[in-house]
Amino acid sequence: GAGVSQSPRYKVTKRGQDVALRCDPISGHVSLYWYRQALGQGPEFLTYFNYEAQQDKSGLPNDRFSAERPEGSISTLTIQRTEQRDSAMYRCASSLVNQETQYFGPGTRLLVL
Amino acid sequence: TQLLEQSPQFLSIQEGENLTVYCNSSSVFSSLQWYRQEPGEGPVLLVTVVTGGEVKKLKRLTFQFGDARKDSSLHITAAQPGDTGLYLCAGVANSWGKFQFGAGTQVVVTP
């Protein structure tokens, strides 16, 4: 079956613009996670969902970042008024249930000019 | 501040040598996972350990969870170039929490 997919794979935007990053988890997976990863570093937790409920958003850097998963499947991470420091690889992962094996997507590389 | 400290940050060895990487914390974890990540790819799970003192083997890889469930190690015997990658540990503190990742150990195995 299909793995976790993310779109777009690359996004270049100008400072001040809003961006929306999409994650399509493995079908049937209850839990969905968003991470940000710097090159050569471990993923930094942003937020996660069980079904449509956002369980923990403590990793979101500030109120410009938000995420939703309205139907318990596809999720969108939105960054408003982007800044250059938001440039990073944004990764999504899903698991059958929380704390089980996480399957990571290919990531979205965001570059804010 | 990293909840999980991984060491060393970087390790370069020759094919056939052994290596050990460490994952340490002052916190107790209910479970801990090890992942390997190759360039341009997402992390891929290697193993999950849940019991203090647990040892798991995966071919040439041996994983150990500390008795107090605060630390873990990954030992690779007779390393091969295919073992090259970023090794990440991730721990969860309680049954409803999220995983926190360490910064990773970059391993390079040269032929």
Image (cartoon, rainbow, N blue to C red):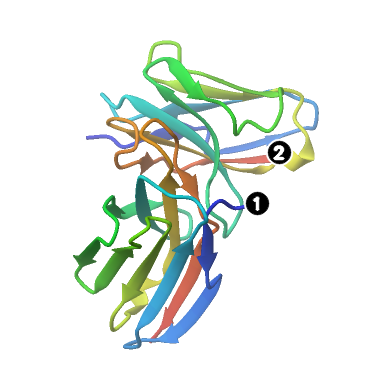
Please report, as a chain letter, where disc 2 is located: A
Question: Which dot marks residue A86?
Answer: 2
For the residues labelled 2 and 1, the Cα–Cα distance comes to 19 Å
Q: Which residue is mark 1?
A: B1
Give a yes or no on whether discs 2 and 1 share a subunit.
no
With respect to residue B103, does A66 lie above or below? above
Rendering quarter of residue A74? top left
Mark 2 or mark 1, whichever is nearer to me: 1
Tell me if mark 1 has few (under 14), some (14-19) or many (20+) residues whose alpha carbon lies within 10 angstroms of its own.
Answer: few
Rendering quarter of residue B13? bottom left
Task: Pinpoint residue A36: horizontal percent, then vertical percent.
Answer: 57, 42
Position of residue A39 in the picture relative to residue B44 (left or right): right
The answer to whether residue A92 is visible is yes
Under mark 1, the amino acid is Thr
The residue shown at (57%, 56%) is A41
Pointers 2 and 1 in contact (C-beta within 8 Å): no
